[in-house]
Image: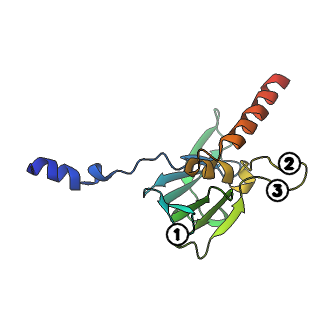
Amino acid sequence: MNPLLFLLLITPAGLTVPQEHVLPVFGCGTGCRVETEQLSLPEQMPDGWIKVKVRQRTWITRCDWSTTPLECIAEPASGRAGPPVQELWLFANCSGEKFATSKSPDRSDAWDQDVFYREGEFAGYPKYQTVHGNPFMRWAKLCPLEAKKGERIIQKQQQSFRDFF
């Protein structure tokens, strides 16, 4: 093997993981965002769930209200917003329409939730709001075929909003 090619294959640049299975940025409240970096390729677990390792960075926007124009900077989160950087596992049950996060690769300490509302006036609608941690859109990146129905609902909601205005 060519020594230069071998070096290219073992360097970090040669080991980059595609970022196509994670939602790159999602909101976590007013002035808050979570950036997600995919660290592993998706793997299917024996029970059918899909898992992927990620690094999440949480940023809070802080503004100096005494300046004109207003000056704002993004700072790493702390306190109530959680740790500024953490490595987690994301899990998706495509057929069961569930999404989970865990610090453990075996999902033993996972918090999972439905990606669609199951009851009430919004039953059948995807949960893509910040208050829920955007489970639908995060699940959709791992389950693109199963997500089509929910994506159509979101598109219709957005079109209705545009038509209203």
Query: Which circle, 3 or 1, is nearer the viewer?
Result: 1
Amino acid identity at mark 2: Phe
Question: Label 2 belongs to which residue?
Answer: 122
Q: Name the outermost residue toward the left.
A: 2
Q: Position of residue 62 (x, y in %)?
A: 62, 49
Q: Please say which color scheme the image uses.
A: rainbow
Q: Position of residue 76 (x, y in %)?
A: 54, 56
- Name the secondary structure under disc 2: loop
- Taking the image as shown, residue 102 lies to the left or right of residue 117, namely left
Question: Label 1 belongs to which residue?
Answer: 46
Q: Name the outermost residue toward the bottom.
A: 108
**Distance CA(mark 2)–CA(mark 3):** 8 Å
Relative to 160, does residue 72 appear above or below in the rendering? below
**Distance CA(mark 1)–CA(mark 2):** 33 Å
The disc placed on residue 118 is 3
Query: Which circle, 1 or 2, is nearer the viewer?
Result: 1
Amino acid identity at mark 3: Arg
Q: Residue at x 67, y 54 (%)?
A: 135
The image quarter containing residue 102 is bottom right
